[in-house]
Structures are given as structure tokens and as C-alpha cells.
């Protein structure tokens, strides 16, 4: 990890965050994949998948037999852990279910807003370097609560052409049965455009690597709905002298092991803490099985010493991390200053891992600085709202003068006439 102090805060984030690297080439490659599948359907989907994965795509859809066999292939302790996590995620997310609203002016006009589930949603589950069955829960539980009628899941297969049993078990737990062994940008293309055998979806959900993220960005330009920019993972930790450096190092490494393009950042008001964490990282990383991935991630990560916690918080709000850990003596006070973050972890015993798996919150969060405007996934993400209005003759008569006056001022004569023709001939009487 690199350490530096940058006095010009306008340069803090641009110098720290990896952005735009080989973006033109990435966009060309992903765009080519999308176009091939848009035009070639199932045949192109098989060809692209085989070229990328390195083995033929024989049976793209997971069979009923595979789904039914999955529970028997998952250790009991893991099944129990998945079920407990699912229950906690459901309990928290049920509180997010939005309520319909209605308002009446007492003079004949009623307005209401009604929430409806999105009919067909596509759920992407990363599985390139690790089978992320936890992401199945994060997508499957809220989409179930929202009431989505059709849910189709895509995930990359392993080299033997199978899907990890834990992923299939988690999917069954969430009531998801329409599952495809397809990953990467090609999965996004199948969801966005559809093929002869796969119907397109109304909205695409799920995190992924830079290829998946770029594919979601490109199809969104064509009007395909997507959840958020959820790309390579990141964490920013703010630690003061009260922090346990072994905890902080472990938190940083837990994100670094996600992938070589993940980024971790430590901010501290203490040089001693910064140096101690750096030493502890060197010790802990040696025992990790994903050491090479960790090394690649740490090469683009940072430890930055700042003058005080307020300056650390200023940086964090500019950086807008996916995960923000406040490993400080008084986390609640500092939390009041948070303006941009996907999910915040308060205190020394709130590791980011808790949110990834079982605390109850969702781990699908905005990345790349987009947390300044985007929110993490929730039940409402799987719904859309429609407004209704009903005006009686009296209601329109009461409101008509206001409507026609405004329409006339905007020189939209037909708008005004749509009121006048209902209320009377020519003008509305006050």
C-alpha cells in the first residue's frame, strides 16, 4: 500500500481512486459482446460464453434435478448459516416495503401513489473467483418481498459446467428456479435483449467485475433499467488511536481479497496507527489463500494520514465509498457527518463482513464514487410507483381557473381547452 499526504483537497480523490484505466478498450470489448448477442441470440451467446469461459456451454439452464440435488451437497452448518442470514435479511427488508399514499383536497380532487412490483427482473450473481451465494440472498429476499412475478438468475459456471450447490440452495430458499449458467457481459446481454430461449427482463440487478459493470452502463444508455453502478468492491476505514490495528488490517484485507481491481483506503489522524496497520497487513496477508489477488488490490490502495478526524471525514465524503468503517472512539458523533457512503459500519466490533453476510442490511451498494447520489439496494429497488388522480366535476371547476391560467402562460392552448371544454364554453366562472 502507498502512503502520501496531499495538501490540496481538490486532488485527494482523483489521485487516490483508480478510474478510467483502459476504459476505451474495455468499452469496445464489452460493446462487441453485447452487439454479437443482440444480433445472434442463442448461437452467439453460446459462442461468446465458450470463447470467454474456455469450455462449451452445453446446458445453459440449470435443471430441476440440479436444483433438487443441491441441498444434499451443502454442509449442514453452512445451510443453517444461510437460513439464519436469510431470516435476518428478510426481517430488516420487510420494514422497507413502501406504503401507498393518498391525499384529498376536500373539494373533489383525490391524488394517490401506488407501488407495484417490477414484473420480470434479472439477477446477476458473481462467481468468477468465488461463488457468492450471499448475493443470492441480497437479491432474492427483497425481490420476493416486493412481489416480483418473474425472477431469472444468471451466474458463471465452474470449469466443470456446474453451479455451486450453495448458490442453488440459496436460490431455492428465495424461491428462484429460473437459473442460467451464464456470466459476464454476455449474461447482461441476454437479460437486456433476450434470445430465442431467454426472455428479456424489465430491470437488471447485481454486482460484478468491470466487464459486468461496463455492460450494465452500456445497456442503460439504450433504455434498459439497471439497479446501480455496482462494480469492483471498495472500503474506506477511518481509524483513530482507539482502534485495534489487527481489526483494521483484517477489515482492509477482507475487501482486498474480493478481486485484483478492489480498492481499500485507510485514513487516520495518527502516524503511529497508520504504520502499525501497515505492518499488521504484511503479517496477516501471508496466511491468506487469495494472496495474489490481495497483492494486486493493495498495489492500488492507500494509507493516508490527515491532521484530524474532521479532515478524514471530508475526504470520505468526497470519495463516497461503497463501505465506510468508523473505527473510532465515538463513531456515532462522526456518523452524523457522513454525507456519502453505500453502507456505514460503526465502532470496533462492526466489521464490513457483517453487512456482507448476515447483519440484515443489503451488501449490493454503489461503487466508484456514485454513493454521492445512489443508494444501496432495497425492496423499493424492485418496485415502481404509479400516481393516480381523480377529479369530480366540482373538483375540476374549483381547480380549473388555476390550470387554465398556467397553461395560457405557457402558451399551451390545448391544455387550457381540455379544462374549459369540460367546465363550460369559453371561460371558467370564478
Image (cartoon, rainbow, N blue to C red):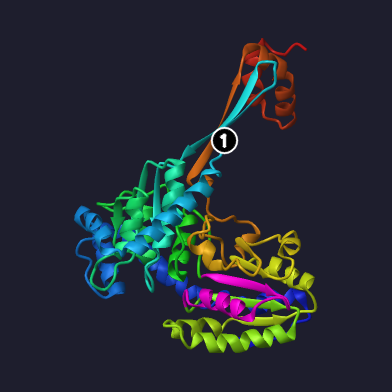
Q: Quick one: 62 or 192, which is closer to the camera?
A: 62
Q: Position of residue 392 (x, y in %)?
A: 62, 14
Tell me the residue at 44%/71% (across/down): 28
Residue linked to disc 1: 99
Q: Is residue 378 above or below residue 391?
A: below
Q: Say left or right for 329 vs 257.
A: right
Q: Is residue 386 above or below residue 37?
A: above
> In the rendered view of the protein, which quadrant contains the C terminus?
top right
Q: Say left or right for 187 vs 411.
A: left
Q: Position of residue 215 (x, y in %)?
A: 44, 63
Q: Say left or right for 3 vs 288.
A: right
Q: Secondary structure at mark 1?
A: loop
Q: Quick one: 396 or 94, which is closer to the camera?
A: 94
Magenta residues (range): 233-259
Tell me the residue at 57%/35% (across/down): 99
Tally of marks: 1
Does 245 appear in magenta?
A: yes
Amino acid at each position: 500500500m502507498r502512503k502520501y499526504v496531499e495538501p490540496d483537497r481538490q486532488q485527494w480523490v482523483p489521485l487516490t481512486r483508480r478510474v478510467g484505466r483502459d476504459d476505451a478498450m474495455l468499452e469496445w470489448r464489452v460493446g462487441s459482446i453485447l452487439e454479437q448477442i443482440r444480433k445472434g441470440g442463442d448461437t452467439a451467446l453460446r459462442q461468446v460464453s465458450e470463447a470467454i469461459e474456455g469450455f462449451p456451454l452445453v446446458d445453459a439452464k440449470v435443471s430441476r434435478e440440479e436444483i433438487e440435488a443441491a441441498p444434499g451437497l451443502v454442509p449442514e452448518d453452512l445451510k443453517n448459516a444461510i437460513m439464519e442470514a436469510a431470516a435476518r435479511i428478510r426481517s430488516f427488508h420487510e420494514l422497507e416495503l413502501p406504503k401507498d399514499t393518498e391525499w384529498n383536497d376536500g373539494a373533489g380532487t383525490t391524488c394517490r401513489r401506488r407501488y407495484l412490483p417490477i414484473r420480470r427482473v434479472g439477477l446477476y450473481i458473481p462467481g468468477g473467483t468465488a461463488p457468492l451465494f450471499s448475493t443470492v440472498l441480497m437479491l432474492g429476499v427483497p425481490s420476493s418481498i416486493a412481489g416480483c412475478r418473474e425472477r431469472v438468475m444468471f451466474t458463471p459456471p465452474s470449469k466443470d459446467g456446474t453451479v455451486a450447490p450453495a448458490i442453488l440452495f440459496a436460490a431455492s430458499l428465495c424461491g428462484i428456479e429460473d437459473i442460467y449458467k451464464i456470466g459476464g457481459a454476455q449474461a447482461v446481454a441476454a437479460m437486456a435483449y433476450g434470445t430465442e430461449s431467454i426472455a428479456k427482463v424489465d430491470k437488471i440487478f447485481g454486482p460484478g467485475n468491470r466487464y459486468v459493470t461496463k455492460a450494465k452502463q452500456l445497456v442503460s444508455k439504450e433504455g434498459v433499467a439497471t439497479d446501480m453502478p455496482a462494480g469492483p468492491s471498495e472500503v474506506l476505514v477511518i481509524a483513530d488511536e482507539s482502534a485495534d490495528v489487527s481489526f483494521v488490517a483484517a477489515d482492509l484485507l477482507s475487501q482486498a481479497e474480493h478481486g485484483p481491481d478492489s480498492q481499500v483506503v485507510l485514513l487516520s489522524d495518527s502516524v503511529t496507527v497508520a504504520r502499525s496497520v501497515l505492518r499488521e497487513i504484511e503479517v496477516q496477508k501471508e496466511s491468506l489463500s487469495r494472496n495474489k489477488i490481495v497483492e494486486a488490490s493493495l498495489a492500488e490502495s492507500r494509507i493516508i494520514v490527515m491532521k484530524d478526524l474532521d479532515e478524514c471525514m471530508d475526504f470520505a465524503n468526497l470519495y463516497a465509498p461503497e463501505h465506510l468503517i468508523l473505527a473510532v472512539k465515538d463513531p456515532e458523533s462522526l456518523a452524523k457527518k457522513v454525507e456519502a457512503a453505500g453502507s456505514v459500519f460503526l465502532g470496533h466490533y462492526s466489521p464490513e463482513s457483517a453487512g456482507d453476510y448476515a447483519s440484515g442490511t443489503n451488501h449490493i451498494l454503489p461503487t466508484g464514487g456514485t454513493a454521492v447520489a445512489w443508494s444501496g439496494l432495497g425492496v423499493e429497488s424492485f418496485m415502481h410507483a404509479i400516481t393516480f388522480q381523480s377529479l369530480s366535476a366540482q373538483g375540476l371547476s374549483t381547480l380549473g381557473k388555476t390550470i387554465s391560467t398556467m397553461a395560457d402562460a405557457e402558451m399551451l392552448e390545448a391544455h387550457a381547452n381540455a379544462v374549459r371544454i369540460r367546465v363550460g364554453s369559453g371561460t371558467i366562472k370564478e
